[in-house]
Image (cartoon, rainbow, N blue to C red):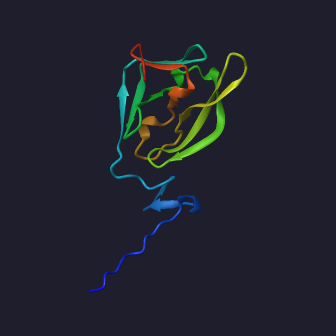
Amino acid sequence: MKTCRPWPVAFSWMLVDQWFEEEEEVFVHARDPYARIDVLQSSSHVQVWFDGEPIADSHRTVLLFETHLPTRFYLPAEDIRLERLTASVTTTRCPYKGIASYWSGLLSDGSVRPDIAWSYRDPIAEMPKIKGLIAFYPQAVDSIHLDGEPVA
């Protein structure tokens, strides 16, 4: 009896202009059915320190839990010192959240630390709770504190 072996099939995401699942555009790669994102409102006190001083202070944080990633803290713009941020030209695409816009931090010496924070102005339909909120990269700021304790 002859055994047929199927030919492996692959394609490069970088070579397609757009990819759709039904009528919705998929960014970067197909979504993993075993990955999960939970978005929860929180009254925990979150502070973000940048350039030696607090740049954000909020009790209205949205916590985003994503499989295999650290918790992200999304804060309302009203709780952030926006004069210490400047819009960046950087954008990225996430198959789970949509297109992210970035913010760079303005240091007290006048220099700029690029892309310290990001936000989703128009997230995909499954992520409405993070619309317009801003999150910071822990490695790009001095520290992030949750209820007074530094976040690792």
Name of the residue lying farthest toward the left: 1
Indicate the position of residue 30 as horizontal and vertical percent values.
Answer: 44, 56
Q: Residue at x 53, y 35 (%)?
A: 119
In front here: 124 or 90?
90
Q: Report whether 101 appears left or right of 33.
A: right
Q: Residue at x 47, y 61 (%)?
A: 20
Q: Report whether 62 appears left or right of 92.
A: left
Q: How many marks?
A: 0
Looking at the rendered image, the quarter that the C terminus falls into is top left
Name of the residue lying farthest toward the front: 1
Looking at the rendered image, the quarter that the N terminus falls into is bottom left
Report which quarter residue 145 is drawn in. top left
Indicate the position of residue 92 as horizontal and vertical percent values.
Answer: 57, 44
Indicate the position of residue 88 as horizontal and vertical percent values.
Answer: 65, 35
Above or below, 92 against 63 in this view is below
Q: Residue at x 60, y 42 (%)?
A: 91
Above or below, 3 against 128 in this view is below
Report which quarter residue 103 is drawn in. top right
Name of the residue lying farthest toward the right: 110
Above or below, 28 against 41 in this view is below
Report which quarter residue 21 is drawn in. bottom left
Q: Residue at x 53, y 22 (%)?
A: 78
Indicate the position of residue 104 as horizontal and vertical percent values.
Answer: 63, 29
